[in-house]
Image (tube, grey):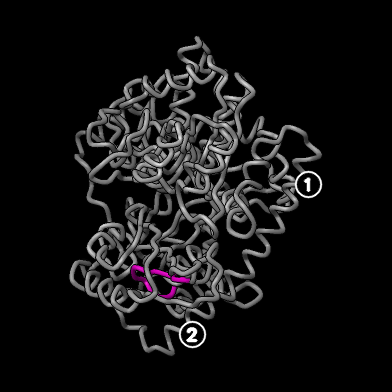
Amino acid sequence: MRWTLKPKPNPEVVQHLAEALGVNTTIASLLVHRGIETFEDAKKFFRPSLEDLHDPFLMKDMMAAVQRVEKAIEKEEHILIYGDYDVDGTTSVALVTSYLRSLYPKVSNYIPDRYAEGYGVSFQGIDYADDNDISLIIALDCGVKAIDKVAYAAEKGIDFIICDHHRPGDQLPRAVAVLDPKREDCDYPYKELCGCGVGFKLIQALGRRRDQPMEALIPYLDLVATAIAADIVPITGENRVLAYHGLQVMNTQPRTGIKALLQQVKKTTLTISDVVFIIAPRINAAGRMEHGNRAVALLTEEDAEQAEIIASEVEAYNASRKDTDRTMTEEALEQILQNQESDKHATVVFDPSWHKGVIGIVASRLIETYYRPTLVFTQSGDKLAASARSVRGFDVYEALTQCEAHIEQFGGHTYAAGLTLDPANYEEFKNAFEAVVADTMDPKYRTPELSIDAEIALSEITPKFYRILKQFAPFGPGNRTPVFMSSEVRDTGSGRCVGEDKSHLRLVLQQDGSPTFVGIGFGMAEKEPIACAGTLFQAAYVIDENHWQGTTQLQLRLKDIKA
């Protein structure tokens, strides 16, 4: 790994903040790195308040959207809530469906079939609306590029409200309203909402018009927190407020469907990390292995027994997803070796038999072995479909833009995207993408970066220090769990490889007579010669707690070791 120590912030600002908060300068430095320089900034950071949410009517087209929904309710129109099949899409649909049904009965939802319809708004979905006398579609987490689909709907007398957070193209669909903070003409103060976050702003605006207090919307925040975690958006600003209060809902009064999921995995208290690695994959598994409407059914179900049945189904989908993921990853790695492509600048692999619902996960797995932008293709009807994943510092969406002459359709973000192309264009695209990555990717991004917040002495690690660190949560992009480094540490002689396959490293670390700390390095067995040679070394780590047999102790979760 390439270690990067963040530069020390202005010492006067750090000292002033440390004195104002009554904390040490390390804590103050961590806060200043996060843009927090005053007592008031810190208060908002440590105590996120729903009062700090922005006025939803600051978003372009919000009033038009609200008035169209109100008209639909007044005229007793049928409303269709339409969303993508991933976590952001299904939680968005569950959120807006649940809220509108609390006001009005003629509300249904629609999740496109991943395999028959693909990503985003589909002609089939619009035909479904037309066949069922639906005159208003609210599209969530998709639609900002659906120019031809919205025009097709208009021909059938169907209006669209679009709630999206992806980058718009040069032209916007001619919808009644396009709610997207990334619109160039939108002055909404916070640009990093997920799709479910934009959906929440819509119900916040609807609630404002009905004089509903914010407390009435709190039960919906568990869905928003789930989407924020799963979509890997920055947990800063408004997202931090929504995630903080959403986690509180999940840990105190989760909706029936999430409670049923938690019972399946025997989990009680959740962190954002738990949502990312436990809850989100299970919700995603429905859309990957079966159909996304099963996830929406779970998240909107109010009967506990029925929710348990659906949660059990979802758990089975997730188990199947894991097996498929493992097999496909092994096949992809073998393909890279057989094609002698281990030294390429990018990874592009294809197999017509690969499961379309898992190719995104496999792309992420391949990056763990070959750290470079990666695309995994499979057959999808008469087209090829791919999921793209990138490495830190490289914009894969922009790279695809430079290859769009070979692509039929694409969309996504800086680090994740999807595309389709004609099979005849596969080799040309593959060569073009490799050339773009080779020409535009800064060489420093070809090695994984370990960003270190501060160098500290082990003696600084105390229960009080850790209690303050825990209040930095929820963690995520823009507010990562602090990573520290300590120099001239040594193992006291207890270091060894542990685990069934002896792939993990367990050390007992000390620095110049400091208290000892257990250090656990998952998958770091190859570092044993450095750590257990009796010599001094540098350790990079995060601080966490180990709960064992009724006792709790601080420990260091090792990220890397250097001689």
Q: Is residue 421 above or below residue 411?
A: below
State the quadrant of the C terminus: bottom left
Q: Position of residue 94 (x, y in %)?
A: 58, 36
Q: Magenta segment, which residues? A: 368-378
Mark 2 Cα-neighbour bin, 10 Å: few <14, some 14–19, many ≥20: few
Which residue is outermost to the front?
Answer: 155
**Residue at position x 33%, y 74% in the image:** 425
Answer left or right for 117 relative to 539: right
Identify the secondary structure beneath mark 2: helix
Image quarter of residue 350: bottom left
Residue annotated with mark 1: 309
Marks 2 and 1, how far apart in space? 39 Å
**Residue at position x 53%, y 14% in the image:** 74
State the quadrant of the N terminus: bottom left
Residue annotated with mark 2: 334
Q: Amino acid at mark 1?
A: Ile
Q: Is residue 372 magenta?
A: yes
